[in-house]
Amino acid sequence: MTMQGETVTAIRISDSEGKLDVFPQKGTPGSSGRGSSKGWQYSDHMENIDGYLMKYTNLVTGWQYRFFVLNNEAGLLEYFVNEQSRPQKPRGTLPLAGAVISPSDEDSHTFTVNAISGEQYKLRATDAKERQHWVSRLQICTQHHTEAMGKGSASSPLSQRRPSQNAASFFSMTQLHKGSSLYSSKRSLLPDHLLDAREMMTQAQGQHRDLIQTIEGLPPVAGPLSPLDQDLLMLKATSMATMNCLNDCLHILQLQQVARQRSSLGGPTIEWLEPKLPDILKNGGPLDNASHNLCCSQRKYCCIPCQEEIDGEDEVEDAFTEKEEELGAVEEERSVILHLLSQLKLGMDLTRVVLPTFILEKRSLLEMYADFMSHPDLFVAITDGQGPEERMVRFVEYYLTSFHEGRKGAIAKKPYNPIIGESFHCSWRVPRSGEPGSPTTEGEDGSYQLRFVAEQVSHHPPVSGFYAECPERRMCVNTHVWTKSKFMGMSIGVSMIGEGCLYLLEHDEEYTFTLPCAYARSILTVPWVELGGKVNVNCTKSGYSAVITFQTKPFYGGKLHKVTAEVKHNATSAVVCRVQGEWNGVLEFSYQNGDTCMVDVTKLPVTKKRVRPNDKQGPTESRRLWQHVTESLRQKDIEKATEYKRILEERQRTEERHRTETETPWRTRYFESEGEGWMYHKPLWKTPTLKT
């Protein structure tokens, strides 16, 4: 026991990293009932806790206070109408073996408990500390009973219910074959118990593969069962998660053994032996001969020199005007999504996870960045502002109107992940206004030309650089973005880490800005996309700044796609402009003098970009690189699109391994590393004729 005010050691389980964080905490009593006197302090034994939490019941009654009891011995979370009814039968019971505890990312009070049966409790604590207390205790209890379930322990209610499905009986279904290929010349590197475990894993993987093939071989409609039966889908997902966990455990044990041998022998290097995953557990199977030949023939692109400047004379107005269809309900692909979810953990980085092809839109991420410039007239008009205040407001207007076309509304599809070295080039012609008869140096028919180039400069982490310039208006923008995605239960979050800078050379001003996060919600039902987070815009020279807030929809009530912004003068803290509305709808600008202005982004004219035809593009340019995937998606041939996509990704992995083995660094074409970011190699301010 600890006295109030003492410093004790607390423990927090991090789902995103899969490890324990230990840190000091004051032993103040909480408000969660009898078991809360130790807060979420670590103890060697699990103890029961109880207390009041708010439980979301339904849309009619909303949130209701209920008395919850964590029964560690039974591995159950029970709740009653109130504390007085505790001697009676619980109003509800949730088994914790195999459950997932998910703190909400929308506030600091809410969390969900997702049972292996599919039942879910959405709960809310009184404050962040109480939520952490409950989440930590639930996670410890869940981990204990999940491990017990895997070992066939009687402490787990699920293992009591299905004793024939525990790990011991699963592994003993087939006798061990001591004469298998696993017992090779490398056997002496690992002790017998690890060799036995590895052999059991091989047999378990074979049995699991047979199970999956049997399920997927069921007739789609006829018969009492089908491959889309909810219980069978849950069995596939949980068995896949179990196999992944077992592989991780064996991997850790082998690493520890290798470390011990290295420390004791101190000389020779021991070759690492990965547990071999069957093809069904991999993201993409082995290449067949035809695909292998195609991959090898396309691999030459790394050696093809790319011309430094793209000839704009070959560019034509973009004829690709096909609208993306909404993803809609995903009932037919539910088994694919459940298979994917079974491999993920909360907070897991999705950078290395191959997502299903049917969620892809028909363009690369690099082209999506170009589509943010689809209102180039608003972009070039920024430098026309009469003073620093007006120029900042114009920048905010352009910034807020760029996401509607860049994200194609709020369609829940994702662009292709760019291949390292991939690039995208295009331009826009912006009509001159108020300057009749002015000479034209770049564009035709009295128009300015705005040029754009993007390049994937890194694969791990995935970093893109893009640059746009209008030499006649003496303005350019340079941006680098690291897209970091993570799994959030029923959502996927994408953080756009990086910074952009707009340069107005005529006024010697630099506007630095960041980008919001994107979220794909309801990925198991009808997916939809929203933006969230706070964006800062700052111009040091003029002393003006802006804060733009993309507000995510709360769980209950609220509006979709809401955005607010304030432009202020830093020296006086005076707010000179306020903006509110929807980033994909109507925006209202309110100025300090009382004037207002309404902007409907859906009615703004979109200037089509100019792109060279695929046959005149380089082998690493986006549209040519992804042309087979794009064409297959247009024809709704998901299987063929998946195969072409897999070939590109496999080629990238092969080349990355080759560079690692030969210690050859990757060389970018258009961007150079500068500090913590990336800069275009020939920015406008380095052009001799434009320096003054």
Image (tube, rainbow, N blue to C red):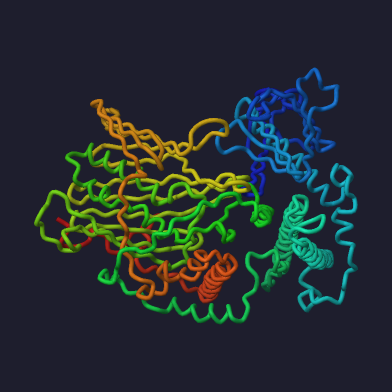
Quarter of the image for the C terminus: give it: bottom left
- Splitting the image into 4 quarters, where does residue 88 fall? top right
On the question of residue 461 being in view, the answer is yes
In depth, the one of 174 and 594 nearer the eye is 594
Q: Whole-percent x and y of residue 198?
A: 79, 66
Find the residue positioned furthest to the front: 222
Quarter of the image for the N terminus: give it: top right
Q: Residue at x 83, y 47 (%)?
A: 148
Find the residue positioned furthest to the top: 84
Residue 93 in the figure: left or right of residue 651: right
Image vertical order of residue 153 relative to residue 595, above or below: below
Residue 530 in the figure: left or right of residue 104: left
Image vertical order of residue 255 relative to residue 571, above or below: below
Q: Residue at x 83, y 76 (%)?
A: 180
Q: Whole-percent x and y of residue 445?
A: 17, 61
- Splitting the image into 4 quarters, where does residue 537 fall? top left
Q: Residue at x 63, y 48 (%)?
A: 524
Q: Whole-percent x and y of residue 631?
A: 48, 68
Residue 155 in the figure: left or right of residue 264: right
On the question of residue 657 being in view, the answer is no
Q: Whole-percent x and y of residue 217?
A: 76, 65
In depth, the one of 568 and 253 nearer the eye is 568
In depth, the one of 441 and 557 nearer the eye is 557
